[in-house]
Image (cartoon, rainbow, N blue to C red):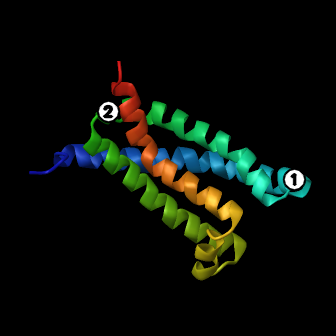
């Protein structure tokens, strides 16, 4: 027996992709501001840390917009699929952008997670994946 019926899986995957797109768009706007304004003033680790709450807010807002529009159930299965689908697209996009925009190799991109700002980014990636579940459980509480 499947955890999520097939139609719901498709809807949850689509929701994950839209969730990714909205949050990535926020990051695409905030990233240059971070790099051009914050990094020269306070350094990259602190700039990434200052940006983190804004990205968390973008995740929350994106979820609040996507979930009702794509009718993703407040159940563990659909929300897990949504988070994993969004996470998969996020990892591919981040790796591709690091190669294309920064000129890094995939090895350099992976090595980046061993820095302070990379660790913060990795934490945000994992929170991004978990956020649909966290919001699901928060909504279920009385």
Camera-nearest label, 1 or 2? 1
Identify the disc placed on residue 123.
none
One can see residue 67 in this view:
no
Hey, which residue is sitting farthest top in the picture? 142
Disc 1 residue crowd, few under 14, some 14–19, many 20+, Cα 10 Å = few
Q: Residue 67 appears in which quarter of the rendering?
A: top left
Q: Looking at the image, is 95 positioned above or below residue 22?
A: below
Disc 2 residue crowd, few under 14, some 14–19, many 20+, Cα 10 Å = few
Q: Looking at the image, is 116 positioned above or below residue 25?
A: below
Q: Is residue 137 left or right of residue 32?
A: left
Under tag 1, what secondary structure? helix
* 1 or 2: tag closer to the N-terminus: 1
In front: 74, or 10? 74
Residue 44 percent coordinates (x, y): 79, 59
Q: Residue 50 appears in which quarter of the rendering?
A: top right
- Residue under label 2: 71
Residue 5 percent coordinates (x, y): 16, 45
Residue drawn 64% across the image and 79% down it: 108
Residue 52 percent coordinates (x, y): 66, 46
Quarter holding the C terminus is top left
Identify the disc placed on residue 42.
1
């Amino acid at each position: 027996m499947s955890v999520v019926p097939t139609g719901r899986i498709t809807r949850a995957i689509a929701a994950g992709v839209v969730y990714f797109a909205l949050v990535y768009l926020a990051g695409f706007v905030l990233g240059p501001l971070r790099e051009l304004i914050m990094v020269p003033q306070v350094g990259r680790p602190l700039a990434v840390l200052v940006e983190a709450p804004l990205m968390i807010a973008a995740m929350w807002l994106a979820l609040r917009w996507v979930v009702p529009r794509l009718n993703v159930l407040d159940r563990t299965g659909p929300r897990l699929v949504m988070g994993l689908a969004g996470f998969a697209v996020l990892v591919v996009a981040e790796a591709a952008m690091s190669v294309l925009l920064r000129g890094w190799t995939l090895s350099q991109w992976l090595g980046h997670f061993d820095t302070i700002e990379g660790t913060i980014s990795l934490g945000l990636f994992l929170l991004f994946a978990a956020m649909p579940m966290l919001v699901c459980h928060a909504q279920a509480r009385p």
